[in-house]
Amino acid sequence: MEMLKQRIRELGVVLSDEVLKLDAILNHAVDPVLTTEMGREFARLFREEKVTKIMTIESSGIPIAFAAAQELGVPLVFARRKKPLNTDAETYSERVPSFTKGFVTDIMVSKEFLSEHDRVLLIDDLIANGAAARGLIRIIRRSGAALVGVGIGVEKSFQAGGRTIRESGVRVESLVRISSLAGGQVHFE
Ligand code: 5GP
């Protein structure tokens, strides 16, 4: 997606060979025009899949997942990182290591928002090693819902997340793929 590549070139900050700061685009500030275009692109890619629900993980996945949900005319449910007020019996929860924060967090989804009749499209802002996405995939599978695919804004393809999920048989579509951050530069595939 050319527009997203341009914004990454303009506003992305390479922090190391592994980490690209995208606060100005995805993780702190939100550009409604870019976000809406990303939602349109996800909707175009998955329109034939009869999606009934978009799912993401709070917080940075929410704007682009909302844009996709709006385009497809379906609800959005986001997994929470804090314990909700209801009891464990009413909640799916999975433990995931956080790539950027360096510790483990629990993600949870209330059972009332996910059923075996759903056809779920998982959307997230960025994939690195894929732990966050795999955690949410486990929750979707446990609910009995069908996972129609995964839509990712930015895939760091030099890390294994996107590849391992594809190898498990899940359709993964990334709007841009970054092959390297070597030398302080963003190299797109
Ligand atoms: P994963 O579970 O795929 O290893 O990491 C996923 C999450 O970590 C993403 O949703 C994102 O919030 C964060 N993350 C991992 N690597 C980066 C990075 O290079 N840049 C940014 N902005 N976020 C990252």
Image (cartoon, helix red, strand yellow):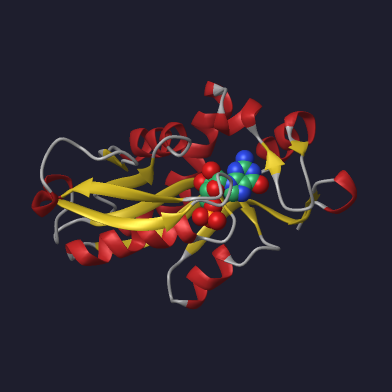
Q: Depth check: give the residue in front, 4 or 81.
A: 81
* Residue 83 picture location, percent across and down: 24, 40
Judged left or right of residue 126, residue 57 is: left
Q: Depth check: give the residue in front, 123 or 119.
A: 123
User: Looking at the image, is 181 positioned above or below residue 144?
Assistant: above
Judged left or right of residue 119, residue 45 is: right
Can residue 108 be seen from the camera position used here? yes
Can residue 125 be seen from the camera position used here? no
* Residue 76 picture location, percent across and down: 29, 39
Judged left or right of residue 103, residue 107 is: left
* Residue 8 picture location, percent across and down: 72, 36
Farthest right residue in view: 183
The image quarter in which residue 147 lies? bottom left
For image coordinates 52% across by 30% down, the residue present is: 35
Q: Quadrant of the N terminus?
A: top right
For image coordinates 31% across by 64% down, the residue present is: 138
